[in-house]
Amino acid sequence: MGKITCCEKNGLKKGPWTPEEDQALIDHIKRNGHGRWRTLPKNAGLKRCGKSCRLRWTNYLRPDIKRGRFSFEEEETIIQLHSVLGNKWSAIAARLPGRTDNEIKNYWNTHIRKRLLKIGIDPVTHTPRLDLLELSSLLNSTLYNSHLSYLINNYNNNHNNNNNLLGNMGPPLVNNENLLSLASALLSSSNQQNIVPQNIVQNQNQIYDNNDDHSQYCGQLPFLSETPYMQSKMEQFSQRTIHDDQYQQNHDLYHISNQGLATGVESSTITTTVAPMELIDHNGYISARSSSSSTTSLILNSSPVKSQRLGLDYSGIGNNGIGQITTHMNMMIPNNNINNTMSTFGRSSLLSTPSSSSSVPNTYNNLNSGSTTTTTTTTTTQEDERDSFCSNFLMFHDIANAFNGNELIM
DNA sequence: AAGTGCGTCAACCGCGTTGCG
DNA sequence: TCGCAACGCGGTTGACGCACT
């Protein structure tokens, strides 16, 4: 039948260890220390191979082994280290006192890995799964036109109402059942369409301020930089020092600002505005005018991974259409680091609105409890929290990676 | 109560690396 | 430099327990 192993060949025992065997091993190591595993079993009176003894000691009997469930902090560390080290379990274990490589490996494979897959993150690359990226990008980019047009028209119809526009939006634009068929249709037609940038998601209440002349926006998307709100924000933004070398270095990074609404989430939900770097002119203005062709290329061809890393959380796709895509971004950008990030990354900067800055959790540690993904969730289990935590953490981590710096990490 | 499916995790296996003669 | 033994690592297996039917 099976291949004869060294243990079987030598008449050595395999399988689970008995308490007596454990005690014999412990006693021997207490007396003589570990090492010399080949001769240890004989000296300890064990009918086991040295390999088995070493494994039993290092993975189970060692006095400094920490048993029990992994804490949030440990899980956080594992994810972070795995994104850097990959499946180097021993290297990861070396940074987690009391945890063995075997334990971490098992925990990864049985818990974390599954959760990542569940939320659409590739556990190997720590990025959104590529098979979902194109689909989602396509949906976003194409739906953006109709979505904003709807919002604008809706706003024009309701501009005396202080409630958020989305309260009147009705059902999401996309549901799970239609997702694949819609994607198929879009894929076949996308090349003929003039797609408006996917990632510019603005707070309609703020952009189209009540003092604006709403009639000018009727039926079409105004250039965002032409709205009074964005004019004022960009004026602040453009006062910051921008270095051309950083622009060159980060030319494919993204302008990020925190805004509310506009993506199918509730009015209390804070979302994040993300615009491709290509859409930001030399004064720091978002230029929708220049984006229609270049953004199509950006989304579908040039750098989908980075755009998704920074702007989109695909865990929300299945549940809430586009809405949750922007949600996690806020979680990923610690409020007290926004200015640092701006100065660090020059043109690839962050804009924070007053509304978001009061709502975004200050620290990474708040990610567990401070999720803004509150759109439809009614119950929260510990597993749910961990799912959310994984998602948040990974996005946070990937942003830091994408910026090629550690400035976002506490 | 018995059968089945599934998740978990301790333990095994094989291969690569290191150290030494 | 080579060969061998010992060790370490990562992938995989299989026993066990629990939930569900």
Image (cartoon, coloured by chain):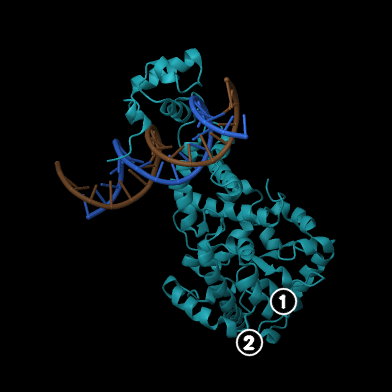
Chain colours: A cyan, B brown, C blue
Are there few (<14), some (14-19), or many (20+) residues within 10 Å of tag 1? some
Cα separation, mark 1 vs mark 2, equals 15 Å
- Mark 2, residue position: A219
For the N terminus of chain A, give its image quadrant: top left
Q: Amino acid at mark 2?
A: Gly
Give A192 or A164, whichever is nearer the viewer.
Answer: A192
Q: Is residue A206 left or right of residue A387?
A: right
- Mark closer to the chain start, 1 or 2: 2
Give the answer, above or below, for where A52 lies relative to A206. Answer: above
Whether residue A203 is visible here, answered yes or no, is: no
Chain containing mark 2: A
In x, y percent, where is residue A257? 70, 64
Q: Is residue A243 left or right of residue A261?
A: right
Identity of the residue drawn at 48% across and 28% down: A58
User: Which label sits on residue A116?
Assistant: none
Give the answer, above or below, for where A237 lies relative to B8. Answer: below
- Mark 1, residue position: A224
In x, y percent, where is residue A56? 43, 28
In x, y percent, where is residue A290? 73, 79
